[in-house]
Image (cartoon, rainbow, N blue to C red):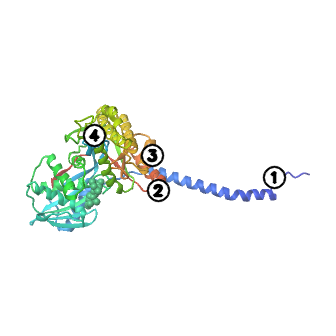
Amino acid sequence: MSISRPAFFPTDENVWRVRSFIPLAQTGLYLLFHLALRNFLTSLLRTLPIKLMTQSELLTGAVQAFKTQFGSSPTHVATAPGRVNLIGEHTDYNDGFVLPVAINRQTVIGASLRDDSMLCIFSKNNESFVQASLATLTATKEHSWSNYSKGVAFELQRKGYTIRGANLVINSDVPVASGLSSSAALEMATAYALLILNKISLPPQEIINICHRAEFDFVGVHCGVMDQFISCLGRRGHALFLDCQRLAYDHIPIPEGAAFVVCDTGVGRELAASEYNIRRQQCAEGVRELKSVLPSIQTLRDVSLEDFEQHKGRLGDLIRRRSRHVISENHRVLQSVTALRKNDLSEFGKLMYQSHLSLKNDYEVSCPELDCVVDICAEEEGVYGARMTGAGFGGCAICLVNREFAGAVVRRLLIEYRQKTGRTPQVYLCTAEDGAHSWELS
Ligand code: ADP
Ligand code: MG
């Protein structure tokens, strides 16, 4: 009688095979488990709802903090939004074109008049309190955050407007120092608060100018005027096409169904200030060189693409690339406005990608993390385009996306950006909203 050998018979050789197979199988199972867990968490995150703070939540917070600080409720409220620039980067100080939107993140200020001439300011965001006499306002190193509000009061008085002492409580969901212009939102909300308290009515251009001077002169940040413009004149569902030379503007409707996802890379913008000054000098050099053949130009804004192509040979490689960015970017803003007017989001998106490449290669103000965000967005369904936004070297990137897919883009960035860079991003789903306003609390 023959006994058939089972398929797996524990001979020495087989035992050895099994033993060597065990660690392999363990590793495989371990990897499988982690992959499954990661996929599960990924799909879970991708379906979670995204919560935004509403204006009334911000207002409630400001009113409560006001009561705690000053023992009564504020009589008035002012609010001003942050902003994101859709296209037109490093064009403002070259007298060119920009296309920002006011976003659904804002700074709210609860305000009341005082009987004296003190300005008392509390920021709920940094739990800090400052008071100063309206007669002797100066910028201080300590509590430098309050310089933005003090600067507005200072500029109002410098222009001859009489203002009385006030209590202000600030509450904001504009990310601070991330490139979404919390500074202009703070200035604009302060201006609207002081104006309504003192029953002063000013045209928007005047308020914009006061806030810009507050940041430029009083705080000492040599910024362009775009941030104050859009925080004041933003319009729901519209972008603001601003000509920084003539200070003329137009509201351009954003097609229904478009949304903006803004991703803060978490990379600090320390380099931005020094590199910004270098870029300004390089642009000035470009103008100097081109002036010999185009004597009427004052800034790169005055140089057409055709003129540039004809005379670019006069410029060295570096200045040629810097100038090409500014001149082509101005052209792209004009094309973007045309695309928006035609409801052509695909064309707009292409111009955003081109803008990013130009900022990366010609102007050299991008960084690997900003490029990473743009690459991630480019792979996602429903995305029209993406680019870095702001001065660069960190800060934020913006993605134009079909509203239906915006949540998926947010969640994908939250997961994939961290996987690829090891950094935690802040991702904001933005819509175009109204600019500053103020009202009396009943
Ligand atoms: P961004 O305008 O891009 O947010 P800035 O560096 O221009 O960055 O301005 C950020 C500064 O504005 C902060 O460091 C702080 O001093 C001030 N600031 C803005 N919003 C607030 C706030 N809600 N509370 C206190 N300070 C604020
Ligand atoms: Mg700012």
- Which quadrant of the rendered structure holds the C terminus? bottom left
- Residue pictured at 25% horizontal, 51% vertical: 223
What is the spatial separation of the Cα atoms under label 2 and label 3, in whole angstroms? Answer: 15 Å
To which residue does mark 4 refer? 300
Q: For this rendering, which residue is in front, 216 or 71?
A: 216
Which mark is in front, 4 or 2?
4
Name which residue type carries label 3: Ile
Q: Quadrant of ligand 1?
A: bottom left
Query: Where residue 329 sits: x, y (%)?
Result: 32, 39
Left or right of 245 in this view: 390: right
Does the numbered disc 2 mark a residue whose Cβ is under 8 Å from ligand 1? Answer: no
Which residue is outermost to the right? 1
**Residue 376, numbered circle:** 3
* Residue 441 seen by the camera: no
Asked which secondary structure carries label 2, the reply is: loop
Q: Earlier in the sequence, mark 2 or mark 1?
A: 1
**Residue 422, numbered circle:** 2
Q: Are marks 3 and 1 in contact (CB under 8 Å)?
A: no
Name which residue type carries label 2: Gly
* Residue 395 seen by the camera: yes
Does the numbered disc 4 mark a residue whose Cβ is under 8 Å from ligand 2? Answer: no
Q: Earlier in the sequence, mark 3 or mark 1?
A: 1
**Residue 6, numbered circle:** 1
Asked which secondary structure carries label 1, the reply is: loop
What is the spatial separation of the Cα atoms under label 4 and label 1, in whole angstroms? Answer: 85 Å
